[in-house]
Image (cartoon, rainbow, N blue to C red):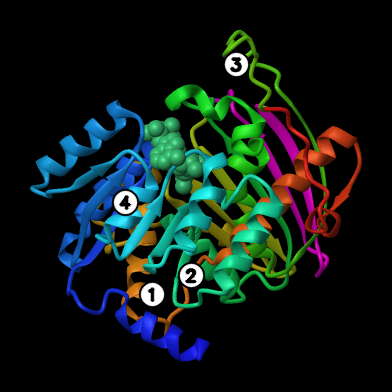
Amino acid sequence: MEIKRNQKEAKQMGSTSPVVKYGIIGVGMMGREHLINLYHLQGHGVAVVAVADPHVPSQQLALDLAVSYNWSIQVFSGHKELLDSGLCDVVVVSTPNMTHYEILMDIINHPKPHHILVEKPLCTTVSHCKKVIEAARKRPAVLVHVGLEYRYMPPVAKLIDIVKGGKLGDVKMVAIREHRFPFLVKVNNWNRFNANSGGTLVEKCCHFFDLMRLFAGANPVRVMASGAIDVNHKDEVYDGKVPDIIDNAYVIVEFDNGCRGMLDLCMFAEGSKNEQEISVVGDIGKGEAFVPESVVRFSTRVAGRSGVQTIETSDDRIRYEGLHHGSSYLEHLNFLSAVRAKGVEAPAVDLHDGLISVAIGVAGQLSIEKGRFVTVEEVLNGHECNYSA
Ligand SMILES: NC(=O)c1ccc[n+]([C@@H]2O[C@H](COP(=O)([O-])OP(=O)(O)OC[C@H]3O[C@@H](n4cnc5c(N)ncnc54)[C@H](O)[C@@H]3O)[C@@H](O)[C@H]2O)c1
């Protein structure tokens, strides 16, 4: 009975209209970035028909964009009204991290099925991620894609190809350096506090833990981290509270195949040529990716330094570079393909990927707090960070 209903539900979703209709929940910086990306995907039969956001300036900016695209959109102040309107086939969740859980549960449990693209991090805690996974399991016709789009940045995608093609042999070490500018100012400054963002290692570094897992081709076992808030936001005060989000860290991740990962995060490093530098070393060779230089280098131990190949990377499919070097465009293209495949194709980045990337981040945050290795198992079994709101 359940299966019959699910098949019927899957058939109905997006099948009646050639245009896939999108709603965007949260139209701040990233929500509007999704709107612009979807505009550039118009040729693929998509339209944004509704947005939901309680913040009037965000609503207005989204509306201005839609008008400039000749899109007539409905504007709601809350996600429930958007869902109840029945206008959308797919919803993008791009609200502050601490709201993802409640909004996802409402979408998944809504009588009308909606496919979901949820921004990273899936949720701010492991227990919330697990509850979302549990709820989604009961609604298999609803596809959920997690917005870990760094995989699609052309140099990263090229390095993934090189690694998966076996050119480096068995991967032993993955080092990711992100050296960048501080966290931007957000609506109501939600990103200044661990209780809202999940902590820096969850909020932003889930991207890198996701990449490490991909390169390692294995499951994370334990995490050791050292980090602090040393430079940024120390002179800021919100409702009498000073931000508590770390701005630099080293994080070591051990995988169950013996591979080691290391993240070097610095958020007061505007003086960097590249924002991300990724190095993957296997028993045969070494590959590197540089963003935004968009360059990949690789060679083998046998060919040595003189054999290093430098590849300029790009992806002809990208129609809009946006804030993330075209990766959000490719993320949408991929998810749209899964939506159109009506259940035959799974989302490329799924809820399990979302959960594990959060779990490694939580383990890192806990490791900093406790001053010891934290196993991923203990985090998956309920050991969470205890942030005061
Ligand atoms: N994938 C990436 O690389 C990337 C980059 C930036 C942000 N993000 C993620 O996107 C999300 C949004 O971040 P942002 O930078 O756009 O923040 P933002 O503060 O610029 O925008 C958030 C918007 O959500 C709205 N909002 C708050 N509560 C809401 C609710 N309950 N329902 C509907 N709208 C609500 C706010 O009013 C605001 O307009 C976060 O999860 C963030 O981690 C991802």
Closest to the camera, between mark 3 and mark 4, is 4
Whichever of labels 3 and 2 marks the residue nearer the N terminus, that label is 3
Q: What amino acid is found at the position of numbered circle 3 in the picture?
A: His
What residue is at 69 percent from the left and 44 percent from the top?
Answer: 263
Q: Secondary structure at mark 3?
A: loop
Q: CA distance from mark 2 to mark 4?
A: 26 Å
Residue 233's disc number: 3
Residue 91 percent location from the top left of the image: 36, 57
- Crowding at mark 1 (Cα within 10 Å: few <14, some 14-19, many 20+): many
Image coordinates of residue 4 in percent, x first then y, are 45, 91
The answer to whether marks 1 and 2 mark residues whose Cβ atoms lie closer than 8 Å is yes
Mark earlier in primary sequence (3, 1): 3
Q: Disc 2 vs disc 4: which is toward the camera?
A: 4
Residue 349 painted magenta: no
Element class at badge 2: loop
Return the residue at label 4.
82
Q: Which residue is mark 2?
A: 348
Q: CB of mark 2 within 8 Å of CB of mark 4?
A: no
The reply, left or right, for residue 126 in relation to residue 299 is: right
**Three-letter code, disc 4:** Leu
- First in sequence: mark 3 vs mark 4: 4
Q: Position of residue 3 (x, y in %)?
A: 50, 89
